[in-house]
Image (cartoon, rainbow, N blue to C red):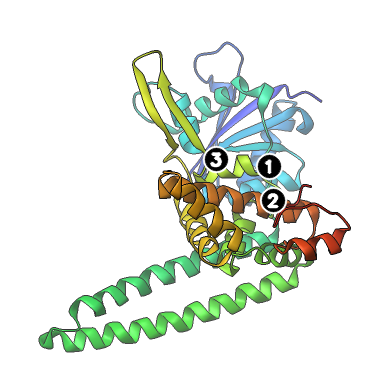
Amino acid sequence: MKKKHFIGIDIAKKTFDAVIYEQGSVKASAGSYRHFSNNGEGFALFLSWLTSENGFKSGAVVVGMENTGMYGFALRRFLENRGVDYCAFNPLSMKRSLGLVRGKDDKVDAFRIARFTYQNRDCLRFSRLSGVTVRKLKALASERARLVRQQAANKAFVTDHKSFEEMRAQVARAQELVSIMQTFIDRVGKEMEETIREDTEVMTSYSLLTSIKGIGPVNAVAAIVSTDNFKAFDNPRQYACYIGVAPFPNTSGTSVRGRTKVSKLAMADIKAMITQAALSAVTYDDEMSEYYQRKTAQGKHPCSVLNAVKFKLICRMFAVIRRGRKYICDAEEYRKTIGLTNLKCGRFNP
């Protein structure tokens, strides 16, 4: 069924505003706008407003909203349980698509979201919450990252001030905090391991990913979380673009001839992790090491070559998940495993 009704929602911590987009209108009318509480009662009233008061069928409705994290989590779960399709848009993408905007108002923002949803009706991709295991891993990974940052700050303080006699007490407390943080980091790591083992599908992905040289436990969890266990992206190129590995040209006409480079509009934390994985692969993977040395010897910039190594790792991650087979770098062992010949080391395609 094609969508006939487009609703925009502007979500706040305690409330949300909803607007039904009326084709051709330049602003929301009085009858097309309602204000609701951001809780179960408000969700029920919102659905009743759409179906009972306006006579919409749930299958003909699509709800547009900004991806606001925890503020919109309960509403998204409610819509999924009621069979209502929705799209959680990237806030930056939506903001830049609006052009020049003056002022800010919840009702106006809801109308803009509704109009944005309508304008992109031909290419909408409905959103879905990640599974319970992936959501739990995401929360644990975020907690671990926060603890690591705090530990690193205290380590830096100890390194910078340990030679000052008058700051002995402060340094001692910082060292104690480093030890405490390590205890918490270890506890979070164990909980992550237990969470992974409880889900067969996630455990399989985790085992496949960690079979790749350079991809450790932290990288594997980050990949599973950021890809919704490899369900959110169709191919490695999409994921490379998402985390900021894909290069883009910078040219225009005959006067602008900038160099091709990666975009800063990316997931910097995930990119930092894949960078560490690439450095590890260049060190411990013979194929990656040979590739890195060969390209740098040809005059390629080391950062450019390292970026290519990142993409190779991403391709390997998607390959092992797609094939359901652990990565094998030894060519002879790989030939024996799948019965093929004339394969280069570490390649899945003959």
Q: Quadrant of the N terminus?
A: top right
Three-letter code, disc 1: Asn
Is disc 2 placed on a helix, strand or loop?
helix
Residue 289 appearing in the image: yes
CA gap, disc 1 and disc 2? 7 Å
Tag 2 or tag 3, which sits nearer the N-term? 3
- Tell me the residue that label 1 is attached to: 235
Q: Residues within 10 Å of mark 2 (few under 14, many from 20)?
A: many
* Front-most of residues 139 and 290: 290
CA gap, disc 1 and disc 3? 11 Å
- Tell me the residue that label 3 is attached to: 241
Q: Residue at x 62, y 29 (%)?
A: 7
Mark drawn on residue 318: 2
Outermost residue, left side: 166
- Direction from residue 159 to residue 39 in the image, left or right: right
Asked whether the beta carbons under mark 3 and mark 2 sit within 8 Å of each other, the answer is no
Q: Residues within 10 Å of mark 3 (few under 14, many from 20)?
A: some
